[in-house]
């Protein structure tokens, strides 16, 4: 019998036995580090939360409650995205995949589910003029964050070199949770509560930057973080595909399969693929591994990125609602699609800019060309939808709906083609200049 390679035995022991292991910090310079199965499982619960928020946004926008719906959506997306970023930051520095780490991660996933169950209450409260915060969401959020306090304290005990920074993270999270709870328990006018929530959010975003600059950088891996963010972006784009399927299913159910249903299906899939293509034209992993200090601004640029992508799915759901209920105007559909797609394009440009630390005016003509189809979609909707809600028994309304969705899709296609023809050259020039400097 052939002897088993000792390296293989050690690998199997690490992969299959999850007893407690030292949490002494990972190698921040490790190349080709990939996401673990527990991290991928963790991501799935967050995508469910994104999808639930997008569905509620579409429902309330279709009902005409645009302002409150957008406010509740922003609140939900920040809560979900920020909790995910905090865990990803910790896991990149200290994820050892032992049993205790796995259990703490699963408990956080339970918190995501609880928070998701509180989203309908949040949107209803916002629609009635109340604060989007509610007890169920706070309970879920606390369950999401408290296990991380224990993990940070464990890391502080087992990694003396970074003890002060790890303790600072635990204290910051604990203080933040007290603040979130107080905004629910202490009665206050809506404006005051919202102001406090914004202040808490800004404080939570600023505190980690200050802590690591004052107390020392933790051993997070820039390449691993780039992969984790790109994977969540990819999974969130699945919401666009799911929403496309829903919109086409509604149209097919109302009219049967038709040229319009096929056109909307094709446009939705092309839109998802184009946004994927555009995002991955940002050379995140290569640049962050070379210059890890750029990770901070780059990761914060993803807060609006995740929300914008999920909102594209909400726009497609608004289109589906127009088909099913015929109470939504073509202008509402156009705006519901054009605004989030435009926001994704803007955040892609912003993410590239903060990553490369360069702002190229040659991108402005491309940016304008990208926005032209979005403006055209709204103009077409305003002209064709003057008479009120979409009536898909009217060939003119059906044609206008397909045209609007196709124009929004064209915008993302223009972004991709433009970057493939022009943008990559500037990326190379910026890198060459940075290396020369």
Image (cartoon, rainbow, N blue to C red):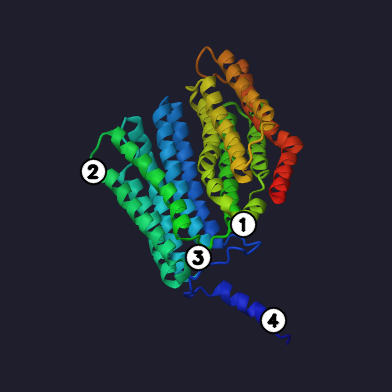
**Closer to the observer: label 4 or label 1?**
1
**Closer to the observer: label 2 or label 1?**
1
Q: CA distance from mark 4 to mark 1?
A: 29 Å
User: Mark 4 or 3 closer to N-term?
Assistant: 4
Relative to 327, is 350 above or below? below
Crowd rating for badge 2 (residues with CA inside 10 Å; few <14, some 14–19, many 20+) = few
**Residue 346 visible to the viewer:** yes
Describe the element under mark 4 as helix, strand or loop: loop
The mark found on residue 223 in the picture is 1
Q: CA distance from mark 3 to mark 1?
A: 15 Å
Q: Residue furthest left?
A: 187
Describe the element under mark 2 as helix, strand or loop: loop
Relative to 6, is 77 above or below? above
Percent across and percent down for residue 234 are: 60, 47
Residues at circles 4 and 3 in contact by the CB criterion of under 8 Å: no
User: Mark 2 or 1 closer to N-term?
Assistant: 2
User: Mark 2 or 3 closer to N-term?
Assistant: 3
Percent across and percent down for residue 305 are: 54, 41
Q: CA distance from mark 2 to mark 3?
A: 36 Å
Percent across and percent down for residue 196 are: 32, 40
Residues at circles 2 and 3 in contact by the CB criterion of under 8 Å: no
Residue 341 position by quadrant:
top right
With 110 as the anchor, is 43 left or right in this view? right
Crowd rating for badge 3 (residues with CA inside 10 Å; few <14, some 14–19, many 20+) = many
Q: CA distance from mark 2 to mark 1?
A: 42 Å
The mark found on residue 94 in the picture is 3
Front residue (pair 325, 240):
240
The mark found on residue 5 in the picture is 4
Q: CA distance from mark 4 to mark 3?
A: 28 Å
User: Mark 3 or 1 closer to N-term?
Assistant: 3
Q: Which residue is mark 2?
A: 186
Q: CA distance from mark 4 to mark 2?
A: 62 Å
């Amino acid at each position: 019998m052939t002897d088993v390679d000792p390296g293989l035995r050690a690998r199997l022991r690490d992969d299959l036995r999850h007893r407690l292991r030292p949490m002494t910090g990972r190698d921040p310079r490790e190349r080709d580090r990939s996401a673990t199965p527990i991290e991928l499982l963790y991501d799935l619960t967050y995508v469910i939360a994104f999808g639930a928020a997008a569905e509620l946004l579409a429902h309330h926008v279709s009902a005409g409650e645009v302002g409150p719906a957008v406010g509740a959506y922003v609140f939900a997306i920040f809560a979900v995205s920020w909790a995910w970023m905090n865990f990803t930051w910790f896991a990149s520095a200290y994820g050892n995949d032992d049993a205790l780490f796995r259990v703490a991660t699963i408990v956080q996933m339970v918190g995501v589910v609880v928070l998701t169950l509180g989203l309908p209450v949040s949107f209803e409260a916002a629609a009635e003029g109340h604060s989007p915060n509610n007890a169920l969401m706070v309970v879920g959020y606390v369950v999401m964050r408290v296990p991380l306090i224990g993990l940070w304290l464990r890391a502080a005990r087992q990694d003396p070199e970074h003890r002060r920074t790890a303790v600072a993270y635990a204290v910051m999270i604990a203080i933040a949770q007290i603040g979130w709870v107080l905004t629910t328990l202490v009665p206050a006018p809506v404006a005051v509560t919202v102001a406090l929530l914004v202040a808490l959010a800004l404080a939570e975003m600023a505190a980690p930057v200050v802590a690591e600059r004052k107390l020392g950088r933790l051993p997070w891996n820039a390449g691993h973080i780039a992969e984790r963010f790109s994977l969540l972006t990819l999974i969130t784009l699945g919401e666009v595909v799911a929403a496309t399927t829903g919109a086409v299913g509604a149209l097919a159910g109302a009219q049967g399969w038709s040229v319009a249903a096929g056109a909307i299906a094709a446009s939705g899939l092309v839109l998802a693929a184009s946004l994927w293509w555009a995002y991955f034209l940002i050379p995140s992993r290569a640049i962050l591994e070379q210059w890890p200090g750029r990770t901070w601004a780059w990761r914060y640029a993803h807060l609006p990125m995740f929300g914008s992508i999920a909102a594209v799915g909400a726009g497609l759901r608004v289109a589906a609602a127009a088909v099913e209920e015929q109470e939504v105007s073509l202008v509402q559909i156009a705006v519901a699609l054009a605004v989030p797609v435009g926001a994704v394009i803007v955040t892609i440009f912003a993410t590239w800019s903060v990553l490369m630390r360069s702002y190229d005016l040659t991108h402005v003509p491309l940016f304008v060309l990208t926005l032209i189809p979005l403006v055209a979609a709204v103009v077409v909707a305003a002209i064709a939808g003057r008479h009120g809600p979409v009536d898909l028994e009217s060939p003119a309304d059906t044609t206008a709906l397909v045209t609007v969705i196709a124009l929004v899709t064209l915008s993302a296609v223009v972004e991709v083609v433009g970057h493939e023809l022009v943008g990559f050259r500037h990326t190379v020039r910026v890198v060459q200049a940075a290396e020369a400097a």
